[in-house]
Amino acid sequence: MLRVGLNGAGRIGRALLRLLRDDPEVTVVAVNDRAGAAAVAHLLRHDSIHGPFPGRVEALDGDRLVVGERELAFGSAAEPCASFWRRHEVSVVIEATGRFTQGGRAREHLAGGDGLVIVTAVSGDADLTVVPGVEGGRPWIDAREGWRSLASRVRGARVVSLASCTTHAAALPLAVIDERFGIEAAEMTTVHCTTGSQPTIDGPHPDPRRSRSALLSMIPTTTSAARGLVEVLPALAGRLSCLAVRVPTATVSLVEIVAHTRGPLPDRSRIAEAFEQPAAGALAGLLGTTGEPLVSIDFRGDPHSAVVDLLLVERPGDRLLRVVAWYDNEWGYANRVADLLRVLAGSFPGAGRGGGT
């Protein structure tokens, strides 16, 4: 049984607690969050997006949290606290606060001891950045070998970045496009739902656009995926631009990729096959496709990293391609965290695992 510590019970942290609530191979044994056990228990019980928690959730004495059939230790330290994790024999710490994303701060969870920290964000100085489904800048050709290789690389590191939800959503389609057609240059835009860092009313922010109410505007901004994508697809360095547009919806986002390819493109049906084949094979459970005319809410609770919308694939020129992929930026990403933990525990994540909330 892999013993996991969770630092930060925000959106990703609480989604992870749902996913692992009765997992036979991975158990969260300790949670640390400044909000306190009672507040975390309430938010876990009553989720505005995923609904009621399917089981018991209760805070006990302020330092314990019951989640399903398991009792977890609870701490409220504001800074990384290695002694808390050691006391509860944690071997993997999930750094999910968004505050300690740099490798130096994340390493404070270990304080020179053994163990592994997985950062749920793009980190410039992590030992390793991984996106399941992509290795060496190319899409996996065999799922079991891909997971085996990923686990081996992760076990050799101390601080691992699992990049970001948008990095995952864009990396898989980009890797497929580059593998099948070659990318000369590309642009990625994420139309991204509101996040907790945005204000609901206007207020000061270093970026004037980000100072405006998230409820009332579409807000152009930067995305950490610009760095994350180059980490996992280094061949695109200097040939990829990225933009985020935040929109006032609660969950589910999309990426639009416009790529100038190295060679002439086939017809739309062959382009669709280029995504359908890996989605049914080596990338099953990570990359999905749909031929239905769906909207964002239809992908709430979808466990894939990205779902390519085949109806929106366009080939406006011999070497110009547009691909749109949907992703549940919380649930899909939390599934990748859970998958990585299961692999470290010695199991193979099956396709479709983690669906539903």
Image (spheres, rainbow, N blue to C red):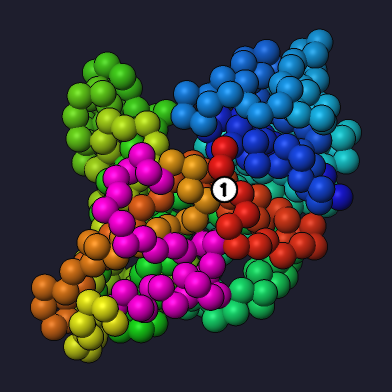
Q: Quadrant of the C terminus?
A: top right
The residue that appears at 20% across and 82% down in the rendered structure is 267
The residue that appears at 31% across and 74% down in the rendered structure is 272
Q: Amino acid at mark 1?
A: Gly
Which of these two is toward me, 344 or 235?
344
Q: Is residue 328 above or below residue 54?
A: below
Q: Position of residue 98 (x, y in %)?
A: 52, 37
Q: Position of residue 132 (x, y in %)?
A: 56, 64
The residue that appears at 66% across and 78% down in the rendered structure is 145
Give the farthest residue toward the top. Answer: 61
The residue that appears at 67% across and 74% down in the rendered structure is 144
**Any magenta on residue 37?**
no
Q: Quadrant of residue 352?
A: bottom right
Residue tagged 1 = 355
Viewed as shown, does residue 312 lie left or right of 101? left
Q: Position of residue 289 (x, y in %)?
A: 39, 63
Give the farthest residue toward the front. Answer: 292
Q: Quadrant of residue 86?
A: top right
- Let me know if residue 234 appears in the view: no
Q: Secondary structure at mark 1?
A: loop
Q: Residues within 10 Å of mark 1 (few under 14, many from 20)?
A: some
Q: Is residue 46 above or below residue 304?
A: above
Viewed as shown, does residue 162 lie left or right of 178? right
Q: Quadrant of residue 307?
A: bottom left
Q: Position of residue 137 (x, y in %)?
A: 46, 75
Q: Which residues are magenta?
A: 271-299
Give the farthest residue toward the bottom. Answer: 263
Which of these two is toward me, 153 or 66?
66
**Any magenta on residue 283?**
yes
- Label count reads 1
- Let me know if residue 285 appears in the view: yes
